[in-house]
Image: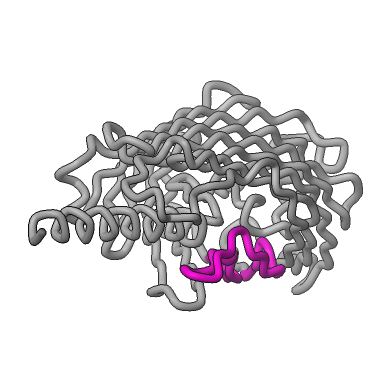
């Protein structure tokens, strides 16, 4: 009897642990995480759309915690361009797979800029609008207790609206921005006996400065801070060197989470490719082989500036 009771309690604990893990998956990583965020800032701040002064295609693939079953895998694509000296438009899509869940996002971005300080510095405001879809296949989980009714019904193509806001102050040497990629709070899953997984408001602050060094080298320290209600403050610190306007080498540190190495090359005036490797700074590093991220940017000559933006961001 004691052994049977122990087995039953163990099963209930495991089933609860799985549900809590799933809740964290749905709740904690609603906003896809990128190490090379400095090259696809539009995904977190719509005010960035068109700010490079040319049509910019960006795509990125991230495989997080390689070797850990069910670890996040993310594909991202964006297109943004200026359509006048004041207005920028953008389109973005990402697919985020975590364990039994698949989340897709499709959004459009609109940015409006005004010039300050004798036309050198610009203040941009942006709005993001779109939809998100969520699928969760509970059959992919190892359910230890048939009494857990929370796993009886899958979530199939649940559609929720997305609305984001952002602002950015910038020139060719520095930038700072604040944004909320989705200001709408959406309940993705609810069970009366357990809990509710809710998408919470994420607020991002970004800033960076470009220093000109001797021998055609530029140095850019940057910061990304993320605030989510009920979670510790997220902080990314990065430092990148641009050498001869062609090779980029850098490193970043995500507070209490990971350290990263970054490398990129500007193949020509239009094409840039980049790679980042993350290693965990937590005990999770014992169970995975790090995270890999590959980035590609392709840019066309602008009808607004008639050249590729020389900016380092």
Residue 132 lies, with reference to residue 122, above or below; the image says: above
Q: Residue at x 32, y 35 (%)?
A: 69
Q: Residue furthest left?
A: 2
In the displayed structure, 299 sits above or below 231; it is above
Q: Identify the residue at the far top of this view.
A: 267
* Residue shown at the point (55%, 56%) measured from the top left: 30
Query: Is 105 placed left or right of 216 in the picture?
Result: right
Residue 193, x across and y down, in percent? 49, 70
- Looking at the rendering, which quadrant does residue 302 occupy? top right
x and y, in percent, of residue 127 in the image: 79, 62
Determine the residue positioned at 45% across, 77% down: 230
Judged from this view, the residue extending furthest toward the front is 1
Going by the picture, which residue comes out furthest to the bottom? 230
Q: Is residue 203 magenta?
A: yes
Q: How is the image coloured?
A: one colour
The answer, for residue 310, to whether it is visible in the render is no
Q: Position of residue 179 (x, y in %)?
A: 65, 68
Does 263 sit left or right of 91 as displayed? left
Q: Residue at x 76, y 65 (%)?
A: 124
The residue stretch that appears in magenta: 178-206
Query: In the figure, is residue 136 to the left or right of 211?
Result: right
Q: Nearer the viewer, residue 281 or 215?
A: 281
**Which quadrant, please, contains the N terminus?**
bottom left
């Amino acid at each position: 009897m004691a052994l049977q009771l122990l087995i039953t309690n163990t099963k209930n604990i495991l089933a609860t642990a799985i549900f809590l893990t799933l809740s964290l998956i749905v709740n904690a990583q609603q906003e896809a995480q990128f190490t090379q965020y400095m090259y696809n800032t539009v995904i977190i701040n719509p005010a960035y759309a068109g700010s490079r002064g040319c049509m910019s295609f960006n795509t990125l693939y991230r495989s997080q915690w390689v070797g850990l079953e069910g670890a996040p895998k993310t594909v991202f694509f964006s297109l943004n361009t200026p359509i006048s000296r004041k207005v920028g438009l953008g389109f973005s899509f990402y697919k985020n797979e975590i364990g039994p869940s698949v989340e897709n996002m499709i959004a459009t971005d609109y940015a409006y800029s005004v010039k300050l300080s004798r036309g050198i510095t610009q203040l941009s405001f942006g709005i993001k609008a779109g939809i998100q879809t969520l699928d969760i296949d509970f059959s992919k989980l190892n359910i230890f207790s048939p009494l857990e009714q929370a796993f009886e019904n899958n979530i199939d193509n649940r559609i929720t609206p997305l609305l984001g806001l952002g602002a950015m102050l910038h020139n060719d040497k520095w930038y700072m921005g604040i944004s909320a990629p989705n200001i709408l709070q959406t309940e993705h899953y609810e069970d009366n006996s357990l809990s509710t997984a809710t998408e919470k408001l994420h607020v991002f602050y970004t800033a960076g400065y470009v220093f000109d060094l001797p021998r055609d080298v530029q140095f850019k320290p940057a910061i990304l801070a993320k605030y989510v209600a009920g979670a510790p403050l997220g902080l990314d610190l990065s430092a990148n060197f641009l050498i001869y306007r062609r090779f980029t080498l850098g490193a970043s540190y995500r507070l209490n989470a990971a350290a990263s190495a970054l490398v990129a090359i500007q193949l020509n005036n239009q094409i840039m490719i980049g790679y980042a490797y993350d290693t965990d700074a937590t005990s999770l590093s014992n169970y995975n082989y790090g995270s890999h991220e590959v980035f590609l940017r392709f840019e066309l000559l602008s009808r607004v500036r008639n050249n590729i933006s020389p900016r380092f961001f």
